[in-house]
Amino acid sequence: MQQAEHVLSVQGVKRLPYYLKFLKELQSKGIPYVPAAAIADSLEIYEVQVRKDLAAVSSLPGKPRVGFSVDGLIADIEHFLGYDCANTAALVGVGHLGKALMSYNGFADYGLDIAAAFDKDPALAGQRIHGCEVFPMERLETACRERNLLIGIIATPAADAQTVCDALVRAGIRAIWNFAHVRLHVPEGVLVQNEDMAVSFALLSSRLAKTLRENE
Amino acid sequence: MQQAEHVLSVQGVKRLPYYLKFLKELQSKGIPYVPAAAIADSLEIYEVQVRKDLAAVSSLPGKPRVGFSVDGLIADIEHFLGYDCANTAALVGVGHLGKALMSYNGFADYGLDIAAAFDKDPALAGQRIHGCEVFPMERLETACRERNLLIGIIATPAADAQTVCDALVRAGIRAIWNFAHVRLHVPEGVLVQNEDMAVSFALLSSRLAKTLRENE
């Protein structure tokens, strides 16, 4: 695939699973091409939005009157979402948050999966939670490398997060989704995405405060 | 307080608790004024950044050579964060995610608090989890109104989320923090902030896929 030139917004990423679902329905019916307008109608969004989203994830040209290759779009969207290399994660920390993530049913829509979980509590080792096995921490590196896992999810207490982060990096993890309320230090080339619940709460609280002030 | 003219970034909101902490230390020592440079030094950030952040939350003028009023800044930051009206929430859904939120220790840094929790499982009613009482759903409206709660957190399965949302709105809730993987419908004037874990995971996955492509 050539490098797509447009950048996809967060809203755009949210639409991708819906495109995929619709395209796979067409594929299963043996339909080879689809016009952007038909995708737009099906998802109840503007055609110009569909064209922008597709241009961001695919360099396939739409053919006049025929539309886009269904197989081609599916491949490009899956490639963009990382389904061929970056869709499975290792989770560390099987407390309430870890269990909530393991049982979260929204990931499957994006083809995402927690492939292995780890906890320092030996009592948890060997358990299966929502189909996912829990390993002791000593198995982190081998289990990640065996499964070629590149994404690590940190759902431990803040005090353990940096140690866990270092272990994940040693295990070959290239991207970290951090739920701990702490700033992580990683080597260059390792991505970190912080999911700071307190900041989200504070943002909502400040938005509400602003609304209340305006209505006073 | 006059309306501040600047808009604060997410990163800016993240810095506010650190400002507050530092300012309260000064307050406790009886120091009435602080220069922006001193705040910047203490937090190891640029003075220009401090000035921008403060301008977004406060219309207090800094006095030459003396700096900003410590009491005034504290009041304005707390007001911006909604500490006087919008810092406590009702949580609905005391499963793994709900318990994870109730035990999350980052909220206190922002003066945020889950003041009451609700679950449809009668077995949970009356329990206290991390100091917060769990009520049966029938108590939602009275408990929220008694405590003047304006923020509702939805941590239920997606199938229950809209029903819960409607009940929260009837109970006087003005802002909803939604963890369910579903789009909520609310009356005009009610804020919704979606915390969609699957979208966050997909964003990280697509960022990693992009990095891997670039390094190929």
Image (tube, coloured by chain):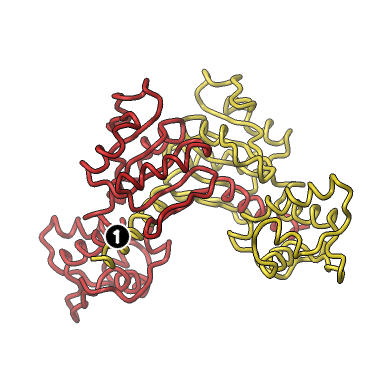
Chain colours: A red, B yellow
Looking at the rendered structure, the secondary structure element under dot 1 is: helix
Q: Residue furthest bottom?
A: A64
- Give the image location of residue A108, x and y in percent: 30, 45
Local crowd size for mark 1, using a 10 Å CA cut-off: few (<14), some (14–19), many (≥20): many
| B204 w.r.t. B5: above or below | above
Quadrant that contains the C terminus of chain B? bottom left
- Give the image location of residue B50, x and y in percent: 70, 64
Q: Which residue is mark 1?
A: B209
Identity of the residue drawn at 36% across and 60% down: B207
Identity of the residue drawn at 23% across and 46% down: A148
Q: Quadrant of residue A100?
A: top left
Amino acid marked by disc 1: Ala
- Give the image location of residue B167, x and y in percent: 58, 38
- Compare residues B186 and A24 and report the one nearer the observer: A24
The chain ID associated with circle 1 is B
Identity of the residue drawn at 59% across and 20% down: B127
- Give the image location of residue A149, x and y in percent: 27, 46
